[in-house]
Image (cartoon, rainbow, N blue to C red):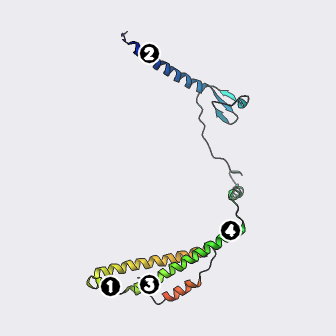
Amino acid sequence: MPHMNFSAGGWRMAWLACAALAGCAWGTAQAQDRIYRCGNEYTNNPTPAQKKDCTPLEGGNVTVVQGTRATGGKASGGNAKSSSVASADQPRVDPAVQKARDSDARAILEAELRRAEARLLEVQREYNGGQPERRGVELRNPALYNERIADLKASLARAEADVAGIRRELQRVGGAATPAASSAQAAAGNAPAPR
């Protein structure tokens, strides 16, 4: 057997390290030895009130996997119940409050529609059926003119899509298209559609 030479401090450190490892091993073994089952719950530290209803489990580790709770009804054919449970979880809104919210939403959408239609008319006027007025720099450089035409065409397509989207949203919330929408269409009638 080899001879180990420890100084006084070395023995003390070795002894403390062994004691710490033994304490950890003992604590782990104790924690695994004292697992209790209290109904459907597993714990290693039951409260004194729970101890009378808890039974200690011996051996092996316990792994508990959290699942989801059933919302009611059977797995098959419980659709009616589950939909009523889902709607019961939703907060109830007073009909008068909901009507005011819908009215506010319609007013906001109508204002957005007026702005979008004004922007559409502005872009249509500038686009001028694909032949906008040339600017001073564009007279000398046709590439800049063609680039501006492409930009205006893209802006026109975006403005038309914005107006159409706001109109769809207004129809969805139950609002009719405003008179401004028909006047914008009439004014746009003299400008040909983008190509």
Q: Secondary structure at mark 3?
A: helix
Q: CA distance from mark 3 to mark 2?
A: 91 Å
Q: Which residue is mark 3?
A: 124
> Position of 118 compared to 63: left or right?
left
Q: Compared with residue 51, is residue 6 higher up or lower down, i.e. above or below?
A: above
Labels 1 and 2 touching (C-beta < 8 A)? no
Q: Amino acid at mark 2?
A: Arg
Q: Residue 181: where, in percent of width, then height?
A: 55, 83
Labels 3 and 2 touching (C-beta < 8 A)? no
Compare marks 3 and 4 and give the one earlier in the sequence: 4
Report crowding for label 2: few under 14, some 14 to 19, many 20 or more residues within 10 A (C-alpha).
few
Q: Which residue is mark 4?
A: 98
Q: Residue at x 40, y 84 (%)?
A: 127
71 and 3: which one is in front?
3
Q: Secondary structure at mark 4?
A: helix
Q: Which residue is mark 1?
A: 135
